[in-house]
Image (spheres, rainbow, N blue to C red):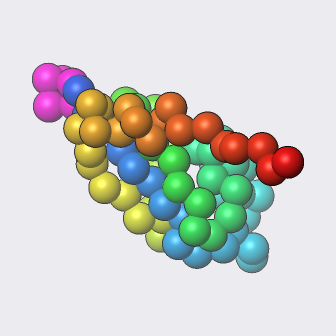
Amino acid sequence: MSATTGTKLHVRQVHSGIGEPEGMRITLRGLGLKGPATEVTVDNTPSFRGAIKKVMHLVSVTEVAASASAPAASASKKKAS
C-alpha cells in the first residue's frame, strides 16, 4: 500500500446527480460534492476510492501530492461586509 502514501485525490463533479438513484446522490454528498463544478480533495484510501468508483460516471478524478493540496485545504471564505 506504499503507492497511496502521501497522495490525495482531487475530485470534481462534472454531471448532476438528478435522475440518479438515491444511493449515488448520497455518495456524492458523502464525498463533499454539492453539485456540478464543485471540487474536493480527499485522502487516497480504499473507502474513498470505493465511493468514487460508485459515481465515476459523474466525476473526474486526478491524483495530487499531499503537500500540493495543503494550501487549497487551508483557504477560508472571506465574509462580505
- Which region shows up in magenta? 1-5
Confirm whether residue 70 shows in the render.
yes
Q: Is residue 46 left or right of residue 39?
A: left
Magenta part, dominant SS: helix
Q: Is residue 65 left or right of residue 25?
A: left
**Which residue is at the far left?**
2
Q: Is residue 18 left or right of residue 42?
A: right
Considering only vertical position in the picture, is 22 above or below 4? below
Considering only vertical position in the picture, is 64 above or below 58? above
Q: Residue at x 66, y 73 (%)?
A: 16
Confirm whether residue 55 shows in the render.
no
**Which residue is at the far right?**
81
Q: How many marks?
A: 0
Image coordinates of residue 4 in percent, x first then y, are: 22, 31
Image coordinates of residue 28 in percent, x first then y, are: 63, 53
Q: Is residue 6 left or right of residue 26?
A: left
User: What quarter of the picture does the N terminus occupy?
Assistant: top left
Image coordinates of residue 8 in percent, x first then y, are: 33, 37
Q: Residue at x 21, y 25 (%)?
A: 5
14 falls in the magenta region: no
Q: Residue at x 67, y 43 (%)?
A: 77
Q: Residue at x 78, y 44 (%)?
A: 79
